[in-house]
Amino acid sequence: MMSLRRASLFVTAFTIHLYAAAAGASDWCVPLSDGWGLQSSASLEAKGEAISTVGFDAKAWHATSVPATVLAALVEDKVYPDPFYGDNITKIPGYKAGRWLVMAQDSPFYPSWWYRTEFELPIQFNVMHAVLHLDGINYRANVWLNGKRVADDSTVIGMFRRFEFDITEFVTPGQRNCLAIEVTGPGHLPEQNYRTKQIEATTGWDDHNPQPPDLNMGLWRDVYITGTGPVALRHPYVATRLDLPSLETAHLTVSAHAINKTSEAVSGVLSGVIENVTTAGSSPRSGAIEKVEFEQPVSLGPKETKAVTFTPEAFSQLNISHPRVWWPVDLGPQDLYTAKLSFKCEAAPGERLPRYGNGISDTAATRFGIREAATYINDEGWRGYRVNGKNVLIRGGAWMTCDMLLRLSPKRYEALVRYAKEGHLNMLRSEGFSIRETDDFYDLCDEYGVMVTQQIFGRSIPNEALAISCIEDTLLRIRNHPSLVHFLGHDETFPTETLDKAYRDLIAKYTPDRTYQPHSGAFELEERFKTGGTRTGSLQVWTYACPSHYYTSKETGAWGFAQSGGIGGIFAMPESMRRMMPEEALWPAWTDIGSLHTVIQGGKYFNPVLKAINDRYGEPSNTEAASSRPAADFDDFMKKALALNYESARGMFEAYGRNKYSATGITTWKYDAAWPASPTWQYVDWYLNATAAYYGAQQACEPLHVLYAYDDHSIYVVNSLYKDFAGLKVGAELYNLDMTRKLAKDVTLDVPADAVARAFAVDLPPDVSKCYFLALKIEAPDGKTLSENFYWLSTVPDVENESDESFANPGVTPGLLRRVSTADYKELNTLPAVKLNVDAKFEDAGQEKVARVTLDNPSPHVAFFVRLIVTKGVGGPEIAPVYWDANCVSLLPGGKRTLSARFAASDAEGATPAVKVVGWNVTPEN
């Protein structure tokens, strides 16, 4: 029911034609979001009959709104402190360390909890069927209304199902009513070793973060009441097919479920309209529009549900000439359409439909995009992606539930999906231990051109019928989104044969244009032929991988498709780390609190990252007085950690670009974090700040990009656009640490569409410092800079021995890659201090502000790894989210660069925004 960015909560705005002129659209939808009370059944003697009665004394209950899990509501009501700060979560009753599935019986969340609200239903519902919608309950519930039980927990079960109940006989329009829902959480299981990470149809957190003590029990999605006539419309859908490769004609198939809610036969007409459709015979995107309309008669028996379909073969107007086509980010526009359907009941001569009369019984609307997405298996057994007949190199991340307490705010969704778009990341893989994502998430992916691969579950659920019911409802809900392109079965495992068959049958029935594979990918490469053409990440590189690894390793590098490969040990920015824990917990590494805010294995899991920082950049050094050593060491450590994250993420994504389409894609593990964590596997942290790894990825994934390849020491141009570039000037300059230029070279070359072109090799000249710099640039024939890139490199190469695994921390750290040789950047610690000239200007752009910051390096030294932060006034706290076009940049002597950023004006909270500039060797005055 919830779609069109929550607007379809009011899709029945036009539901009863009889009253449409007299009342506003939302009169036929009553959101039940505010005015709820929450209480544990352990504190109550009353039963459902009394609790669901108007006037029941609930003054001592906890006030809340819905959606809210039990723990989220109690935190909001100040019963428990903020579980995201420090080690507060460990002090909440019911907390368990590590991964767990069974809730302890002495937990305050083991008993059921009651949600209760009183509401008034408009008098107009006297002539409608009133329908109660429960869009998300975790995990099972008894539903009571005005002293009567509407449904019990034998049927209301499963986190990923929407429930609706005809409550016409239970409510009294025009008067006060009471709804009470008794929720029992997951985890009511026998204590035993299940040898699995998931056993119920509920969310899980794998090893991302601590389990919330309530296991996310409660009403986690919307509750509302709608009104409908004799026939209700559900599951509107538009499937699209394009003539390829021309894209000249789109063929639309429109369908919906018509539900007769009465005990009598009903006939009527189902009609639809799609507006702003390019007219036949007009040129593409010429601006000519027309309205496409279609209708057909429908007859329904008593209580019958019928899928009604309009095919392009039967309705020629559904063959659209020169359609506006949906494309992934950077490859074209994200054009979207809306189809509106309505059902009008018709009475036979002399007959009268009980209570309703003639008129519109219900409406439904859905937004869709015209596009054709497909996957294929190449000659080497790897899965690749095509959109609208064009190959697409996938470079994205594994998406997980974005808040551990399921406080799924529009701002959080907007920021995270927009960051993907601004970072040129074209896919998010919604992983199977997370929630089945909301329409808010999918709507934003539609709008920003971010494709989605949806994983079905993490593991096989023993209650297979329930699992199938959850996925059937999920498919019906998300199938309209053009961003959805592919399904995975389970995470690193195969579904049971019955589940696998059920998934295939459901996809074939409801969305046959999407592809499916049963397994996210095995660790062994040869298994890709059985799992579906992908591999999972490597235990060896989930902790750390140097930038050259993805060029030099065919086992775990940029070859084929990695569903969850990627570098590990990605740190949040120091500003975020200081928000998530007290100062004394920051350093040395792996204090108890610091370790809690990593992964459930604890901070020692990332010991290889600490070793890599020390080996490459040098151990943290005290730069201030002895009294402040811990803070100084932490700051020194962090600047090195951020540089390490940037170079690794950039190298990984660049290797996939250089190797396309032998490399077909990666959705790196992982993209976001559900709570404040550092280090973990995140590109955007919980505070909605981008990490240094994000900026490395953003640099690597720009549509036209110049890069240095670590394996053959050559310069390449990667063109991800579907157009040719002619006469590009590609240049490279190599500098010693003291900024003596040792090499300058350029060539002019043509780069075909969606291709990779080698420019030249960089032959290392003599007398190069151990750490040196390489600056790259692409210029158009008119001299305009199209791409620039900056590397710090070493004469000491990174050399790994994959066959030699060591276990530095048995049971904690996985098998590691032993490095025979490690790049040495310790000379960076001797860089002279630089003072930059900074000119920051802000301008209004609607509800956003735009920052334009010009950095000027007047010194004879490099300004290395310069980071920009927007703050609420000079010296104030940072503003987040902020969308930079680039960050973590370096400037050569005399260099000047202008960077821009956008952010919500309201996030400045009335302060005059300012820009803070920090860097490896930038003086504090900046």
Image: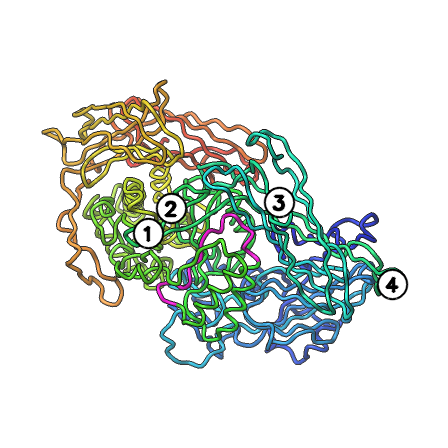
Q: Which residue is mark 3?
A: 318
Q: Amino acid at mark 2?
A: Ile
Nearer to us in this view, 568 or 212: 568
Q: Are marks 2 and 4 in contact (CB under 8 Å)?
A: no
Image spot of residue 582 (x, y percent): 40, 54
Q: Which residue is mark 4?
A: 351
Q: Which residue is mark 1?
A: 561
Classify residue 825 by image quadrant.
top left
Which circle's residue, 1 or 2, is located before the other in the chain?
Answer: 2
Q: Amino acid at mark 3?
A: Leu
Nearer to us in this view, 145 or 634: 145
Q: Are marks 1 and 2 in contact (CB under 8 Å)?
A: yes
- Label drawn at residue 394: 2
Q: Amino acid at mark 1?
A: Phe
Which circle's residue, 2 or 3, is located before the other in the chain?
Answer: 3
Q: Residues within 10 Å of mark 1 (few under 14, many from 20)?
A: many
Q: Residues within 10 Å of mark 3 (few under 14, many from 20)?
A: many
Residue 29 against residue 176 in the figure, above or below: above
CA distance for labels 2 and 3: 31 Å
Q: Are marks 3 and 1 in contact (CB under 8 Å)?
A: no
The quarter of the image holding the N terminus is bottom right
CA distance for labels 3 and 4: 35 Å
Question: Is residue 83 toward the left or the right of residue 270 in the image?
Answer: left
Image spot of residue 440 (x, y percent): 56, 51
SS state under label 1: strand
SS state under label 2: strand
Residue 63 against residue 480 in the figure, above or below: below
Please state the extent of the stretch shown in magenta in the rendering.
477-494
Q: Residues within 10 Å of mark 2 (few under 14, many from 20)?
A: many
CA distance for labels 1 and 4: 63 Å
Question: Is residue 597 toward the left or the right of residue 170 in the image?
Answer: left
